Structures are given as structure tokens and as C-alpha cells.
Image (cartoon, coloured by chain):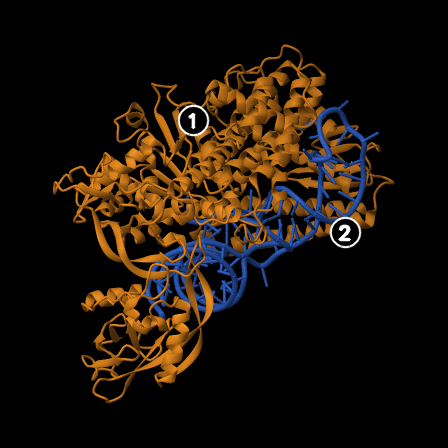
Chain colours: A orange, B blue
Amino acid sequence: MAEMSKRYDAAAAQERWDSFWADNGTFTAGQRPDAETFTVMIPPPNVTSILHMGHALNGTVQDVLVRWQRMLGKDVLWLPGTDHAGIATQAVVEKKIWREQKKTIKELGREAFLKEVWDWKDHYGNAILGQTRALGCSCDWTRTAFTMDENLSRAVRVSFVQLWEKGLIYRGHRMVNWDCVLQSAIGDDEIEEKETKGHLWHFNYPLEDGSGNMTVATTRPETMLGDTAVAVHPDDERYKAVVGKNVRLPLMDRLIPIIADESVEMEFGTGAVKVTPGHDFADNERGQRHSLPVLNIMNKDGTLNEEAGAYAGLPREEARKKVVADLDAQGFLEKVEDYTMRLPLSDRSKSVIEPLVSEQWFVKMEGLAAPAIQAVKDGTLKFVPERWTKVYLDWLENVRDWCISRQLWWGHQIPVWYDEDGVPAASLDDLEIGAAHPKTGKPIVRRDEDVLDTWASSWLWPFSTLGWPDQTDDLARFYPTQFLSTAREIIYLWVARMVMAGYEFLGQCPFDTVYMHATVLDGQGRRMSKSLGNGIDPNEMIEQYGADAVRFTLALLTTEGQDVKLAPTKFELGRNFMNKIWNSARFVLMSVPEGSKPSDGNADPSDDLADRWILSRLNATTVELTASLGAYRYHDSAQTIYAFVWNDFCDWCLEASKLRLQAGDAACASTLLHVLDRIVHLIQPFAPYLAAELAEALGHTEPIALASWPDAGARVEDAEADFGRLQETISAIRKIRNENRVDDKTDIDACIKTPAPELLVAQSELIQRLARVGTFTATADMARPGLCATEVRGSDEIYVPLEGLIDIGEERARKEKELEKARAFAASIEKKLGNENFVSRAKPEVVARERERLVEAQEKIAKLEQALADLG
RNA sequence: GGGCGGUUAGCUCAGCCCGGUUAGAGCACCUGCUUUACACGCAGGGGGUCACAGGUUCGAAUCCUGUACCGCCCACCA
């Protein structure tokens, strides 16, 4: 084989294997027609920009699982793709056009604008898929999807028409979040709330009968122009007498009623609230309960309309000033307080959201929610970690109708046409202008200009990507999927809706398990954002540390907690580990005799202690790793393999092998090859590039990614116990050398007084090598050989003669400290055992164990006391 | 206002569900090391009254109650 370099060259490995996998279609699904399937749909990233670290983490979470399942023999489909992200993408492209051409999109025109967006989509969509590949994600690239692909668009249209025909889609005047800059309704998810210092104005509305005033408080004075009532709490003694009376609305000179409604907080402000059903969500609901008229005083661009009388035409900010000034001038202003409130801002345009009643399309949700609720209740759908189930249920159980129309250009245009009377019809095929309306027969005059909310395509993702509405082979074979990993922010927006769509259109839950991955934060625990400039670019990290290192590090940091705090230097851990594995392989491959073959492991066990021990540890590791992967415990999985490779294999097994390899021990070579081969299998889900390189070096001709996950044999208890004793002995001798600052060039000897010398005598060569001692002896009646340092390990006493090398004072101090600890420990056990309740109530095996430990501790104390006495 | 998470070594975090070795890891720190795989390394070491207060228990980092602080989510205090 070619000589391996001293360092793992991640970049070279990535380049080789990325194209190898692509060229060979290694991850194309359907190659195991007789096997069980395992399907994962990637949460399609928005084509707004390139991927961030959260995507890299999610990619790792999915790929580790997917690669493991593939090794378990499944026919795996991991389907990649991207989302057109309607409003978000339109907003970024709109900004770009303004920046570069100083044109609004209206000036540019719909067609030219859409061409710009498609260009943007091509660029970022490709970048995203490229990044996903660069991370090593084993997606089926032949099935890559985009939410506005022709077949996915058809799925959207079919789903719309089906819901329409069931009567689940309706057009309504409903209150929506209105973005006055984008001039579109926007979803709840497209809003961010910002703490803002404002004012709370108190106004006096005079009672019609002249008997006094109702004082109301508001943060938005201009809306008073649209007031249609004043509300108080029905139990509020202060106002019981006035409920039912009217007040005269200042400035507008209208009479409006005083109503009683339980939604009013008596303690807040004056306990009386002005009701503006046209411009406030809460007031809108109050208005509905009391059949109040809805007055809309605002145009779509945020200026006031003719309903605002004298204020018509003013932008809302100016109207506010003028209303306050006029009320003040006319003596209606009671007082102004400073007030901090949460102002809703549009994510995209940063303008203040205006609750506005407008005509929109809605989907009735209640019926759709029922099976989605049932799915978690009967265990069809599981959340990991489980606590997110509650979040999901809380939303579904209080679900509101879904406003699905958006006044945008980028997206799926609503498939609704109107006749000359404005009667709508939904249609699978485009209707020509002038064609007959399918219901009324009158000529079609226009198509609805709006597009659908972006989630109206993503909620179909688990099956539209497989060809639905056609009954394709892929759909039959790969739906439903098994696993979804996503961010908790979109439990409602996406996860819940996918479940609803799955039941509605296919009668099946779209996935078994929803895994909520951690949120990636910066080193200080802040969210990564462009404005803070604290993002860590996964591309840069891959370039600097390698994809395997990035993946392994992310897997290790992925615990079930809420967040992952990440600093770039964390990836050193992964890089160092990859390099460690690489070098361990390099050592094995350069050290084993030509023509060595791996052993059969458990089937053909070597009788050497080190071999039996490492096999036992390998088996234990395989069992643990398999269990933690099955439980989606990424941290544990990564930790398990890290500890095995580094501590067991490298620190002990390889070091112990050096002696035997020099002696040309064939069993040793075979064992090392076997263990290394297993490590390559076990690390493959985490570090696919490294695994591919090493598998090749080990002579595999088939891709390791398609190999079988190893079966674990049994543990070998006696080998673990015996080798453990050797490790203790060797560490003890090393400790003596280090503590007494005896350099490596100075020879030391070691002798051990032990009731069971056989093992140590048999392994004395190994002890000599690893502990760097010259003469080594072990007998049952060993006498302390003059002035020496002592370590106690169980029943063994380890003596290292240090005449002339030892600082007796320091050694005494160390032993005294140790003795003190041992005495304290023994005392604590004695106390426990002296407790009648403990002895009678604790489990017998716990009590027995404590008795043993006490004997051990007392033995240790005696030995330490003797050692101290012998130090003189 | 409601809900959820967190508080363990200087730092970042495991462990807690299912109570029982003298609470672990990585980084950082200290000592020593061109040991022929790896300094992205090796050997050894120091460092924690497990946020606080109660309770349950023979026994609590682990279970229960409360408090404080940090973070997230939901909600119609205008």
C-alpha cells in the first residue's frame, strides 16, 4: 500500500470520496429491494442564503443515523432539497434589486422580478446542496427536490383543490398581520417582537348623559378613530352602573356603547379599554362577541383612509401625533405615561406590523388537527426529547385557521379564478380568460394574483418529494418516513402541519420520530446572527479542520439539552481525534508483517491476555454504541467510541502490542487488524471520509458505507479484570517515577508483594516495557528492598527502590495525605455499617459490598502505615 | 400571566429518567518527556461542600417542595 502521511489529510480524502460516491451512486436509494426501508426527508433549507452551523449540526444528526441504518442493512433514502421560502426570499431579492438597480419591484414588473428570484434560487440552491455534500451527507442526489419544482407545484395545486372541494378553504375578512412595506399579510412566524419604549396615553371619553367620563388607556392613539366601544370587566364594581350606556367618541363625534367583557383586566390602567375591532386582534374578538361594527381606518400602505375623516391621507405616525395634539387641545387628554411594550416588527422589512382586516384565503384547521393530536396520544408519533410533545399538543389543541394567501409574487400562485361577478373557482388546470366558469358558466375575467404561504408547499414535503399526487413506486416504497430532525422553532409551522397533511392526503402519519436538535449558540451563549457577526461558517470550519472533525465534534456536543455553545476551537477535539485514529491505523499497517490477515475476533480468539482484553472492550463498545445510536444519544455514541479508540486501543492495546510485534507475534498482528477494521466500521457514520480512506488501506474493495454494522460478541470478564490489574500496576509504577521526578534515562526496578503473583510474573515483560522498569519481580513474601517508594493497589504493594533518588520528606507527605484519605473513607463506611437501619434496610448486596470495601480500606491503611514506618 | 429548560472543576459540558464505588470528559493549568503511529502527541498531577433552603430516605448531584438567578416558548394588560 501507499505510504500513509503523518497527518490525516482531510481535504484530500473529501475530494476523492465525495466524487467517488457521486459517480458511483453509492447513496442512491432502491438498491436493496428486499430490505426494509429507512426514509428521512431533509428539512429543506431556505434558498435565502448559504447554510449556517445549525444546518451543519442537523446534517450531522441525520447523516450519522442514516449511515448507521444503511449499515444495518436497510434500503435507505435520505432525500435532499431546498425550499423557495416565499416571503423571505422575495424580501432578500427585493433588497438586492433596490441596492443594485435602485428600482422597486413594481417598477421592474412581475416577470422580470421572478427571473431575478430564479437566478438567486439557482445560485443559493446549488450552494446549499454543495455544502450539504461537503459535510459528507449521504443523500440520494438523484432525488433532489425543490418546493417549486413542477411536480411539487402540482402537488400544492392538487392539495389546494382537494381541500377546496371538501369545503375546508374559505375566503374571509379576517384580521391578519399586515406589513405596510411589503404590502402583504404575513404569518405569525414572520414577526419578531421588540421591547420598545413608548407611551401610554389616557383619554377621557364623555358619557352621553353628561354624568362623567370613561378614561381609557392606549399605546396607539390613532386607532381611537376606529373605536366602536369601550369595554369593562363585568365584575368591576366601579363600572357596573355604566354598562349599556354610551360615550361620545371625541374627534369623531360618534356614540359608542360601553360593554362588559371578561377579557378586560380590571387591574390594568383604569380597567376600561377602548375597543377597535378593525385594528387590534383582541378587540376584533371582543367585537365579534358583541357584534360590534368593524371600522377600517387604514389603507394597505399605512396611511389613514376616508373612515378617519379629517385625518384621511396621513401616514399612521403623523396621524398619531395629530390625534394626540387635537385631543389635548380639546381637553380630552388625561395624562401620558412612559410605557415599555413589545412592538411587533416584520422579520423581513422591519416595519411595525399593523393588525388589519383584509380579504384572505383560510384553511379550516380543527378537523385537520384531530388525527395529528391522536397520533401522539396513541404513540404513532414520538418526539425526542419527549418534552416537545406538550408544545406540539398545546398548539394543535388551540389551533387557529391558517391564513394561506400572501400578497407576493414569489411562490405558488393561488389556483383560483373569478367570473365577472367575482365568484371564485379553484381549478387543477389553468382557466383561460373568457372561458366558462365551471359553476356559473359566466366568463372568467381574472386569476387571483396572490400566492400561497410557503408552508403550503413544505407541509407536503414528506410525500410531494416522492411523486405524490401520482401513485409512484417511490411513494409506495418510501412513505411514510421514519425520522425527522428539525429545529424547535418550527414545531407548529412545519412539523404539526406535515402531520396534518400526511393524514389528510395519505391517511398516514408522515414519520415515526421527530428529533428536536439543539440550538447552536456562540461561545457567549448568544444566538448566531448576521447582525452580531458571531456566526461560525461551517465551510470555513470544514476547510480548517475537515468535515469528519466538524461532524464528530458536533455529534459529541449534541446532548439532549437545549443549546450547544460553540467556539471555533472546539473543532480541534474532532480534528485531533481523527488524526489519532489515522495514526493508529498507520502504526498498525506499518507494523504488522506482510501478508497478515485480521483474526475472526470472537470466532477465533487468541489466548493472549491483551488480545482477549481488547476484544472484550471492543464488544462492550459495540454494544454501547449500538444502544446509544438507537436512542438518538449522539453525545454518548461519540463519547463511547472516543474513549475506546483513544484510551483502550491506542494507550494500552497498541502500546502493549509493540513488544509482541517486534517478536513477530502473528496473533497480535491479526488481532490489531481485526480491531482496527471494527473501528473503521464503527466510526463510519461519524467520519465517513476517514473511514473510506482507512477501509481502502485495509484492503476493502466495497464501500465501507455499505458494509454491515458489526455484531458484538460477549465480554470476557476475567480478561478485563486481569488486564485491569496490569494497568493499575503499570500506572502505579509510572506514578512513582513521575512523583519522584526520576527521568526516563534513569533505570528503576519494581518489586511487588502480592498474594497472587502468577499473573504479574507471567506478564512481567509487558510491565517492564510499559512501566519502563529494569528488573521486575513479584512474590507473595516480598520484603521491602531498602528505601523505596510504595503504592498500594488492592492487595498488591508496589515497591520501587529509590535509594538516592527520593525526597523522603515529600514522599512522607504524599503517603500521609493518602493515609488520611483512606482513614476518612474507612470511617465513613464504618459509620454506615454501624447504622442499624442501613444494615437492616439496604439491599443485602449493597451491605455486603460495603463490608468488602471496609476490609479493603483497612488493608490499605495498614499497608500505608507500614510504608510510612519503613520510610523512617 | 402561563409553560419549558438550565445552574456540577477556571471554561464548555456528561452523569439525574431507574437514589448506593472516593462525581467523570474535553479544554485550560502544573511537572516531566526528540519512548522508532501521532507534540493534532506521551506519562503523571492538582482542581468540585453538584445554585440555595427545606423535605422524603438507612443513604440524595440523582426523588419531592420552595427560593434565587440565566435562557427559551406561548398569551388579547389595552
Marker disc for residue A140: 1
Which residue is painted at 39% across and 77% down in the image? A324
Residue type at mark 1 is Asp
Q: Is residue A670 left or right of residue A331?
A: right
Q: How far apart, in angstroms, are the residues tagged by discs 1 and 2?
A: 65 Å
Q: Is residue A788 visible?
A: yes
Query: Is A643 located above or below residue B9 in the figure?
Result: above
Q: Secondary structure at mark 2?
A: helix
To the question of a shared chain for discs 1 and 2, the answer is yes
Kindly give the residue lying farthest to the right in the view shown: A804
Where does residue A666 sit, x and y in percent of width and height?
A: 64, 14
Query: Is A709 located above or below residue A500 in the figure?
Result: above
Of all chains, the one bearing label 1 is: A
Query: Is A870 located above or below residue A665 in the figure?
Result: below
> Are there few (<14), some (14-19), or many (20+) residues within 10 Å of tag 2?
few
Q: Is residue A528 left or right of residue A417?
A: right
Where does residue A415 sit, x and y in percent of width and height?
A: 25, 40
Q: Earlier in the sequence, mark 1 or mark 2?
A: 1
Where does residue A782 sit, x and y in percent of width and height?
A: 74, 33
Observer-nearest residue: A163 or A830? A163
Observer-nearest residue: A166 or A94? A94
Q: Is residue A142 left or right of residue A834?
A: left
Which residue is painted at 54% across and 16% down in the image? A700
Q: Which residue is the site of mark 2?
A: A813
Q: Is residue A573 left or right of residue A810?
A: left
Q: Secondary structure at mark 1?
A: loop
Which residue is painted at 75% across and 33% down in the image? A751
Of all chains, the one bearing label 2 is: A
